[in-house]
Image (cartoon, rainbow, N blue to C red):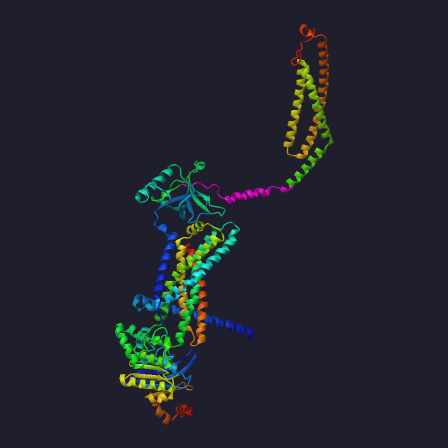
Amino acid sequence: MIEANKFRLGLFVIIGSVLFFIVLFVFGLSDIFVRKGKFVSLFNESVQGVAVGSPVKYKGVPIGTVSKISIQVSDKLIRIDMDIDMKAFVTDHQSGAKAVSSFNEFFQNESKMGLRCRLEYAGITGLKYVELNYFDQFSQSPIIERPGYIASNYFYVPSIPSQFKDILNLINTSLEKISRVQFDKISDEMTGTLKSMQRLLDDPKLKTMIDKMEKMSDNMEKSSSNVSKVLTESKLREIVDGLDTNLKSLNNLTISARSSIDGAKFIETAQSFREAAYSVTDARQALLSTLLKLDQTLDSLTELVNYLNDDPSSLLKGKHKPMIIAPTSK
Amino acid sequence: MSNESVVEVKNLTVGYGDIVVLKNISFSVASGEIFVILGGSGCGKSTLLKHMIGLYTPFRGDVLIFGESMVNSSEDEKRKLMRSFGVTYQGGALFGSLTVAENIALPLEEYTTKTPKEINEVVQQKLALVNLDGFGNYMPSELSGGMRKRAGLARAMALDPTLLFFDEPSAGLDPITSAELDRLILRLREELGTTIVIVSHELDSIFTVADRAILLDKETKGIAATGKPKDLRDGSPNLWVREFLTRSKLKRDVV
Amino acid sequence: MGSPSRELVERIGAASTSVFRDMIEMVCFVGDLSKVSWRVLRKPSQLRWKETLYYMDMCGSQAVPIVLMICFLMGVILGFQAAVQMRKFGTELYVADLVGFSILKELGPLMVAMIATGRAGSAFAAEIGTMKVNDEISALETMGFAPSRFLVIPKILAMVIVSPVLTVFGDVIGIAGGFVVGTTMLGLPLMAYYNRTVEVLYPMVFILGMVKSVVFALIIAVIGCLRGFQSECNAQGVGRATTSAVVTSIFLIVIADAVLTIIFSLMGY
């Protein structure tokens, strides 16, 4: 017999309809009941990545969605209409006309203070969203003034160019530049440089030079202790002068070495290094002569000391000789 | 019983696809007459019936029911015309999804302004007429073949038509049930003066009920003979007609 | 011309004639139906409410368990497959998008249509085919009824009403299936998945899914009934009619789905 199970059918229809409305509501029909503010902005750059439904954020807070993207034929600008959910703004007035007016007031103030909108990347996928914020660093760049064709119930937000007009472009040029670098040549040169460096370091002359330098410094230490015992002003000055010149020439040496190294041409650098080494050798010779002089100074100092030992009073009476200052010993 | 013709078939040519089954058939059925269409298997008698009741459209010719054309009328006129007669099909053709009573009540619900109570009365009356009292709440599948046929008859008569078509009323019934059905047909004519057109090859019932018969010939695709079955059997000039009416009788006798 | 190639050409010719004839019959049937529907629309008392409710129960409430199960599993499968791929990119949360959109836009209506084809479309064809074998169709006609008013309109109406409702069930449970995968297998936070789903889906997607399901319901009911009426008057004929109803329905549903998807995408959804 044809007879519907009316209870089951009724249950089916009721549950189905209830579910239908719940789903509609959950998926955003509730938006219809939400008061919306209408924003509009004009862009003279590509809006690639923005679509109807893309989020609009105020300092990162989602406050609405893009509702329409169109092209203004008159000035070839891209017009983006946005629906702003007033619920995102908590005011003292939760609803009614007062809430709307306070919302309008808020944005009018914000606009005066330089509120701008800019397209920003939402992630690596290339999708963009509209960010409302103060972009001080760009405030000097000219903005598009509010044109006449925008209806008065729209709130106009001037746009500023996005940080990267196109991030892909940037990456492309970077990649191109990188690809132009000749890595194999660089590595060849590096290898050659390393080899010549090695050769240079293996040079036995360098080793002996360092040894000699060491000895030299030992001698100098001894000398200086002697000097500290007995030192005449003039001799000292002489010594200091000599040392000074030596140091200066050492300094010059270093500078020329450094400039050679800075020259980046390592093969030539090695050459100049060698030259520098030669000049170090020269310096050694200069040092040797200095040492000789020091020796002589030492001798005369010893003489002086002996003389003083023999006749200490001469310190007071003086000998018909230049004055001797002995600051460290009597 | 008047002599005006209730059904008139004029130069009817029928068939399926490209095959012509019957050619240039013409006859008429008078009011109150019990008219039998005879013929061997496959001679096209069921086809002829289906054309007469408007289920099929003929190649040529016309069928007039109560003087109105079945072929040249619009669909709405045809439907209206169809309501004026009842048809009983071989298997009863009851709607399997409805009870017997609901089957009979269906045309009443659709075409009359009767209240459910009045409809129920009519249904009970029709059930009584075909000796099916108390079977109103049965589903057609719960009935025997003969009962289904009678229930179909009850449904065909629901709107009290003055013209009834029967498609093989006795086919598949035992002799006793078949005889009962014959008596029922005769009673209908007696009591209600209904004109009845029967398609059959059951000679027993034909001799019992038929006022007039036509015999269809498969070979000539036309009517081989017209007349009272007994007269045809005894005095037809056509040997084939006599043979048809007797040989099959002989066969039955042998069995 | 060689005989095998001639035979092939003849066969192609015969096939195209039969397809063409079938299409013409379909158009005639739809035309006839719209005439009857218009009449019923103007005089709703002519509608067979009892039958309509019966078919609503049969094609609707009785189909809920199977719809729930299949759509839930569909959501699970979809979520699982999406999860496997998206995990590679660390974008698991997008499973919510994929499951949500696929279920609402395609799989919800499509799965419900497939189930309805199997349950209702075949039943319609078998029922009408059997009625034809039993002369019930002829009886209806000679009783002066338009068979389509009795047999087709209630079925179409019932299907058109219940199919969107079933789709709602399928959509909700399908998204729930994705939800289960997202929260258990991917370990996404419950609220994150929910919020993502609510964020990306919008009502129009859902509504257009409903529109699709209505179109599919029409196809299923009309084809089921048409094949029933075209059935040959024997048991094998009824069987063939049933098979043909299912095959034709699925074929036309897929075509309709493609056409609707194109139309909707042209509309911007």
Rendering coords of residue B37 (x, y %): 36, 85
The answer to whether A105 is drawn above or below residue C152 in the figure is: above
Residue B10 in view in this figure: yes
Q: Is residue A172 magenta?
A: yes
In the figure, residue B135 lies in which quadrant?
A: bottom left
The answer to whether B57 is drawn above or below residue A195 in the figure is: below
* Quadrant of the rendering where the N terminus of chain B is positioned: bottom left
Rendering coords of residue C251 (x, y %): 46, 65
Q: Residue at x 72, y 27 (%)?
A: A211
In the figure, residue A195 lies in which quadrant?
A: top right
Q: Which residues are magenta?
A: A158-184
Q: How many marks?
A: 0
* Quadrant of the rendering where the C terminus of chain B is positioned: bottom left
Residue B159 in view in this figure: no
In the figure, residue C162 lies in which quadrant?
A: bottom left
> Considering depth in this image, is A287 or B197 the residue closer to the camera?
A287
Q: Is residue B55 left or right of residue C247?
A: left
Q: Residue furthest bottom?
A: B235
The answer to whether C72 is drawn above or below residue B249 in the figure is: above
> Considering depth in this image, is B16 or A254 the residue closer to the camera?
A254
Q: Residue furthest top?
A: A317
Q: Is residue B173 magenta?
A: no
Rendering coords of residue A190 (x, y %): 65, 38
